[in-house]
């Protein structure tokens, strides 16, 4: 009996710990302004992926111009790059503009998203926004600009 209680307690503690860790990898949707402000200051013109790394750090992958693609970890407090990698490519810039990012987030917010984990676009123009609703449930909103969103809730 004692062993069963210890196992149940351990499982519960692990579940709570996993929830706490997950919550650190999200940002309130209101922090998107800071993300885009620091992204623009760094030089991003097109965004391929924006991912929360913790409450004060974000990873942005995108284009600085038609030749330079970058992946940068930025501090949201200072805007300073914490890690950066650049590649010169001849494929040309593509992805979401700042206006596209804002529109995708507005769509996600309209579906109840209050915290986001990640936003990314594929080459076909499909945008996925992953995050959580006000009850802490996982929420995934998939959209294309000008099309209706597809919503998955866990």
Image (cartoon, helix red, strand yellow):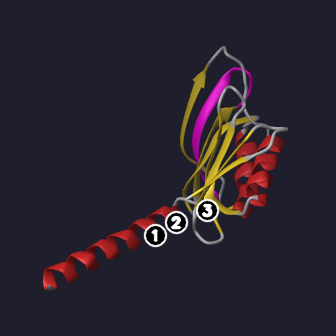
Could you say whether the residue bearing mark 3 is in a helix, strand or loop?
Answer: strand
Q: Nearer the viewer, residue 2 or 78?
A: 2
Q: Position of residue 54 (x, y in %)?
A: 53, 59
Q: Report the magenta stretch's main SS.
A: strand
Quadrant of the rendered image containing residue 124: top right
Which residue is found at the position 29% from the left and 72% from the top?
11
Q: Earlier in the sequence, mark 1 or mark 3?
A: 1
Given this view, does label 2 or label 3 mark the residue nearer the observer? 3
Q: Earlier in the sequence, mark 2 or mark 3?
A: 2
Could you say whether the residue bearing mark 2 is in a helix, strand or loop?
Answer: helix
Q: Which residue is mark 2?
A: 23
Please identify the residue farthest to the top as the structure is shown: 90
Above or below — where is 92 with respect to 147? above
Which residue is found at the position 76% from the left and 35% from the top?
45
Q: Nearer the viewer, residue 47 or 3?
A: 3
Image quarter in which the N terminus is found: bottom left
Above or below — where is 104 with respect to 131? above
Above or below — where is 135 with respect to 124? below
Q: Which residue is mark 3?
A: 132
Q: CA distance from mark 2 to mark 1?
A: 5 Å
Label 2–label 1 contact, CB within 8 A: yes
User: Pointer 2: residues within 10 angstroms few (<14), some, or many (20+)?
Assistant: some
Quadrant of the rendered image containing residue 85: top right
Please identify the residue farthest to the bottom as the structure is shown: 2
User: Pointer 1: residues within 10 angstroms few (<14), some, or many (20+)?
Assistant: few
Label 2–label 3 contact, CB within 8 A: no
Q: CA distance from mark 2 to mark 3?
A: 9 Å
Magenta span = 64-76
């Amino acid at each position: 009996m004692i062993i069963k209680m210890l196992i149940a307690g351990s499982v519960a503690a692990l579940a709570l710990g996993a929830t706490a860790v997950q919550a650190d990898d999200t940002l309130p949707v209101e922090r998107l302004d800071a993300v885009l402000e620091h992204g623009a200051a760094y030089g991003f013109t097109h965004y391929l992926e924006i991912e929360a790394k913790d409450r004060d750090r974000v990873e942005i992958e995108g284009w600085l111009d038609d030749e330079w693609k970058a992946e940068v970890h930025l501090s949201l407090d200072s805007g300073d790059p914490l890690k950066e990698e650049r590649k010169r490519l001849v494929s040309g810039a593509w992805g979401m503009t700042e206006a596209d990012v804002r529109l995708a987030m507005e769509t996600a917010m309209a579906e109840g998203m209050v915290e986001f984990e990640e936003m990314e676009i594929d080459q076909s123009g499909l945008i996925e926004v992953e995050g959580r609703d006000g009850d802490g449930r996982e929420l995934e909103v998939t959209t294309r600009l000008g099309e209706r969103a597809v919503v998955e809730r866990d």
